[in-house]
Image: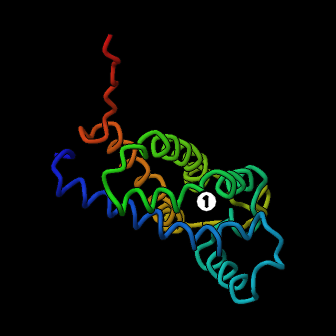
Amino acid sequence: MMGTPGVRRGLEWLLGLYFLSHVPITLLLDLQAVLPRELYPFELRNLLKWYAEEFKDPLLQDPPTWFKSFLFCELVFQLPFFPIATYAFFKGGCKWIRTPAIIYSVHTMTTLIPILSTFLFEDFSKASGFKGQGPKAFHERLTLISIYAPYFLIPLVLLLFMLRSPYYKYEEKRKKK
């Protein structure tokens, strides 16, 4: 089914939108934790503060070092890839995107495992490293998981698409003797 042209183009457009939407999210919100605060206007800093408090997101209220390392990877590796992937998927049929897309999807899914696990299993009491910041009720944990889960699920779809689509499967060309 992933091989039919209509389904393939629809999925490419979905992925193009995903990568296009990721650029402003990364630049305007995510990177506030690793870049100097002077780079961001007061309104953007307040938007992030509102989100972190409203949704009880402990990773953005007071980002731990391990989370900042993921954001640094987002800055250095993922952000430059977003416009390239946006172009490739909106244009469609760019077989050269396969290997970078596989690398991106595996990297992103790997970073989401500790993030989602933190939301599910972390003790957010005042005695924890999160100093009482974070979700208390199970529905608050599920809300955070639902916010972050697409950043696991869409790369999973991308990975499966790149691995399973007959269109994107690499065919080795052999030289004739």
Q: Residue furthest bottom?
A: 43
Q: Total label count?
A: 1
23 or 150: nearer the eye? Answer: 23
**26 on left or right of 139:** right
Q: Quadrant of residue 119?
A: bottom right
Residue lying at 68% horizontally and 58% vertically, measured from the top left: 75
Judged from the image, the secondary structure of the residue bearing numbered disc 1 is: helix
Above/below status of 45 relative to 16: below
At 34% from the left and 24% from the top, the residue drawn is 172
Q: How is the image coloured?
A: rainbow
Horizontally, is 7 left or right of 76 in the view? left
Q: Is residue 19 left or right of residue 80?
A: left
Q: Please determine whether, in this image, residue 24 is positioned above or below residue 170.
A: below
Which residue is farthest front? 177
Q: Residue at horizontal 35%, vertical 18%?
A: 175
Specify the quadrant that holds the C terminus.
top left
Decide which of 50, 42 is in the foreground and name it. Answer: 42
Percent x, y for residue 108? Answer: 54, 48
What percent of the width, then of the height, locates residue 127? 79, 57
Amino acid type at image mark 1: Leu
Percent position (x, y) of residue 25?
Answer: 57, 71
**Front-lying residue, 163 or 81:** 81
Q: Position of residue 33 (x, y in %)?
A: 75, 66
Q: Tag 1: Cα neighbours inside 10 Å, few (<14), some, or many (≥20)?
A: some
Residue corresponding to mark 1? 79
Q: Residue at x 59, y 54 (%)?
A: 78
